[in-house]
Image: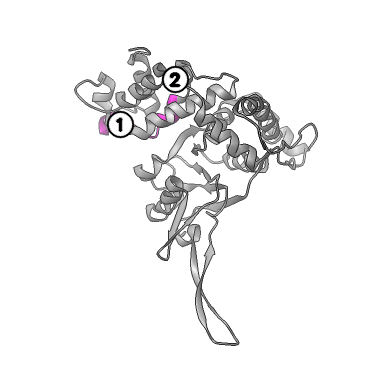
Amino acid sequence: MTGVEKLSPPAGLDDGQLFDQLADVRARLAASIGQVIVGQEDVVNAMLVALFSGGHCLFIGVPGLAKTLLVQATAQSLGLNFGRVQFTPDLMPSDITGSDVLDEDPATGRRELRFVPGPIFTNLLLADEVNRTPPRTQAALLQAMQEGAVTTGGRTIRLEPPFQVFATQNPIEQEGTYPLPEAQLDRFMLSIEVGYPSEADEIAVVERTLTQRPAALEPVLSRETLLALQGLVRRLPANDDVTRYAVRLARATRPGPDSSDAVRRFVQWGAGPRASQFLALGARARAALRGALTPQIDDVRAIAPYVLRHRVLLNFTAEAEGIRPDAVVQKILDVVPTRG
């Protein structure tokens, strides 16, 4: 691919050298993805935070907004194994995880069970339209997303790292969809809402698709480099103020006697401790991707809507008044002190 070189594995590099590579890696990835995705800078930036944090990511938007194309372009730009599952109402859990088949030796007549791995045995899994299948099949992803392993036939099989799920979802109000179970939603580090493009971007999309063939992307990042950078992000320092602020934000989403008016009025359940962890981790990744060694309060605030919007369960009052989770999260950001 013109102007993009594949990065070499980081053999023998220390953390300082890895950190120096990160900005270049981010620029190369963004340039590669930009060959097929027009605009959507905020969406791409949030996705890269999840990617380098090693977290799972949920893309929400109506059909036709290039959610699937974005994940495919990302996979092509990475030196990783890629799998895709198109979720449908008749999809079974074994269609995702794999199943045992009975083999028979023609010579001896001996029979034995052989496990045939499903598409989940990959590095980057695209779960396309994940909310179009019933909860029983959606739950097949739970163990893999949390533990990086699949249990089948009484044995547990580890998945090769990195293992990340990038799922797309149509809005719940669309016909033929199922709400994702809260336990599964909590496994997604970020929930990214993909909106309509601007008029200029939409014109560029039409012109590009009518006059050009789809770009054939080549990997710009090796698996070893990605794993090393994911490990680096988790080792980066963070001051106590940032960590405390992340915890205060997560706790502020939970209804209680000390809750804000908006939380007491509109929230049924708030975010759990995993939200605090992802706020702190996402802030580290966002800071590192913009070239800062340590995250700041602004990094936590910037990543908060992506981390919290799918973990704030609204009550009937909120639904009746048309209140969305993002509005509640913004009210929380307005009242939670940044120091203290």
Dot 2: element: helix
Give how far across and how far down residue 293 sits, in percent: 55, 20
Asked if residue 242 is positioned above or below residue 272 in the image, the reply reads: above
Instruction: Please name the amino acid that badge 2 sits on.
Output: Arg
Residue beneath the point at 46% across and 52% down: 149
Residue 12 shows up from this direction:
yes
70 left or right, relative to 89: right
Dot 1: element: loop
The quadrant where residue 121 appears: bottom right
Magenta stretch holds residue 79: no
Quarter of the N terminus within the rendering: top right
Give how far across and how far down residue 176 sits, in percent: 43, 50
How many neighbours does mark 1 have within 10 angstroms: few (below 14), some (14-19), or many (20 or more)? many
Give how far across and how far down residue 50 sits, in percent: 52, 34
Residue at label 2?
Answer: 301
Q: Which residues are magenta?
A: 304-318
Nearer to me, 232 or 167: 232
Residue at label 1?
Answer: 270
The quadrant where residue 280 appears: top left
Asked if residue 193 is positioned above or below residue 296 in the image, the reply reads: below
Farthest-out residue, right: 2
- Rounded to the nearest angstrom, the CA distance separating label 1 from label 2 is 17 Å
